[in-house]
Structure formats: structure tokens, C-alpha cells
Amino acid sequence: MGGLPANRTVNGFAVVDPKIMYVAMRDGLFKSTDAGETWKRTGGELKNLAAVAINPKKPNEVYVATMDGKIYMSADAGMKWKKQQ
Amino acid sequence: MKGRIYYLQILMGLGWILSGSISLAKEPNHLLPVAATHNDSQKSAVAFEHVHTLGIDAESRTLFLGAHTGLFRRENGGRSWRKVALPASVSHLDVMAVTPDPKNSKTIYIGAHEAGVLKSADGGATWKEINSGLGGVDVHGIAIDPNDGKLHALVRDKGEGIYRSTNGGGKWIRVDDGPGGEVKGLYSVNISTGMGGIFLYAPTAEGLKRNPDCF
């Protein structure tokens, strides 16, 4: 197990397919494809994240919210992101 | 198989364990400045202050956002947010958790500071408090089992612990102490424990923790 930043709060969590998980942290967005055993940062420069959600109908569509309320969406499971407001 | 069962018994014995991190230190929980967005239809500003959570209903029609300033909704494909009216007994609702039922797009649960659990059975139009049996009303997480709809609610401060409901929130029974400390949410993850249950995951100030839900 490993890959998440040490000494950090995990603010948000999302899962649909039980193997594929995302966590939202101040350090950014992290993704696991093995049910949380290992984690890799995804989402480029995204930081200060409060929450993450997965579209249950389109699991590649992922939303994050920053703590101050900016919303970003990825249509490719976390690779590319577009600010929504 | 025998080894896997033994491993799970060890997990049970240890209680809530960290997933993917071994950190124990705590990060300060800063409040950040207010951001404003605009409701195009009403030309009024909607302020999000300290966002806590996002949730999407089962048919992906609505994105819900829980924040220090309440519950907001945005229809799929739209760009404008509307504040959701909540009939709480307290005037100010800090929405910590939004949990749409994965099998029924009309059913949404939210957890809030000082108001416990609220449920909507009509897609978020009307809400009622469902706190019978909860030892406290500072609810930070609501998990719904994707297999049988069983609920777990995480209560902090007074009555701290995890409460289970098997009738859609009609009655809650305390089943566990929970991960303790500053917990940010609670999620059922459809991974079998091999003992008739699945796992609960909890984002916390100490990292991501998990525990089998068969308390």
C-alpha cells in the first residue's frame, strides 16, 4: 500500500467500479486502480481539492470541487480537466 | 483462501486501518475565502463557502454540492447552481455529506452539522429529518450499500460512532466506534470481505481508512 502523500488530510473520496477510486486532497487528486492498495497523482495541477464525484452512468466522467467552490470536470478518467465555472 | 480469511481476521482485530498511507499526523483545517457563482436563471449570486462534498444521482441528472453554506444543485449539462431549500429545525445547515441512492435516482440522503440525516424521496424537492435512534446530530458521512441499500451514518461529537439502518433511515442502531478523529465522510465500497459484508472507506485527517462493515 502506498502512494498517497504522508501527513495529509483526505478530504473527499469517490468510487463506482470498486477497483477504481479517487481521493481529493489539498495536494491534488489521486487515483487508485487496485481498490486503494496503490495510488498515483492524476489531474495535473489541480490543488486544494475538497471533493470528488464520479458520474455513475459514465464512470470516466469525474468532477472535483476546490475548497473555495471551483468545479472542474474530466471526461477521460482524470487525464484532462476543464474548469466549469 | 485460508490465508485471505486469516488476513481479514487480522484487519477486523485492528479496527479501522489506513489505506494507501501510513501517515498519522494531522493537517490544519483551514477555511478558505468565499467564491461566488451566478445563477443564470435568477441572476442572483450563490456563494459556496468551504465545499465539503459532491454527489451525482443514479441517473446522472443532477450534481449536488454540499458546503458550509448549504446544499446546491446543478442539472446535468447546465452551468447554473440553485440553492436547495431544506426544512431543518436549524436555520443554518452545514452540509457534510451527499449520498444519492445508486439504485433509485429519486432518493438522496444528506448529512449535516446539527441536523443529522435528511432524506428526499423526490429527487431533492422535499426533505425530512430521519434521526430516530441516532445518538447525535453532527453527521459527517452516509454510506449506502449498493447491494441491499443498507445505510451507515457517521456521527461525530455527541454520540460519536457509526449507526446502521436497514429500513432506509427509519431507525438507526449504533454498531461501531468508527475511525475516530476528524472524519470527512463514509462510503460503502462493493468489495467482499469474505464474511458476508463489504468494506466501508472513510477519508480522515489521518488519511484514507477502511474497515469491514460487518460490525
Image (cartoon, coloured by chain):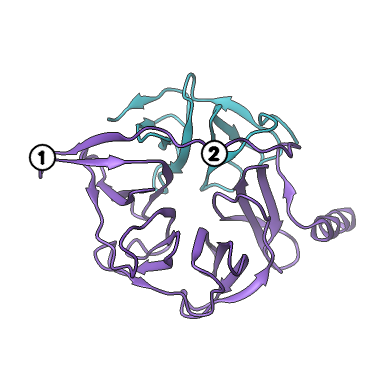
Chain colours: A cyan, B purple
Q: Please tell me the numbered disc located at residue B43.
A: 1
Callout 1 crowding tier (Cα within 10 Å): few <14, some 14–19, many ≥20: few
What residue is drawn where x is 60% and y is 70%? B159
Question: Tag 2's secondary structure?
Answer: loop
Is the residue B203 above or below the residue B16 in the image? above
Question: Tag 1's secondary structure?
Answer: loop
Q: Dividing the picture into quarters, in which one does residue A76 lie?
A: top left
The spot of residue A22 in percent (x, y) is 55, 38
Is the residue B28 above or below the residue B142 in the image? above
Q: State the separation of the CA atoms marked 1 and 2.
A: 33 Å
The spot of residue B151 in percent (x, y) is 53, 68
Callout 2 crowding tier (Cα within 10 Å): few <14, some 14–19, many ≥20: few
- Does label 2 lie on the same chain as label 1? yes
Q: Dividing the picture into quarters, in which one does residue B8 lie?
A: bottom right
Is residue B65 something one can see in this rendering? Answer: no
Determine which residue is flagged by label 2. B29
Q: What's under tag 2, amino acid-wise?
A: Asn
**Mark 1 or mark 2, earlier in chain:** 2
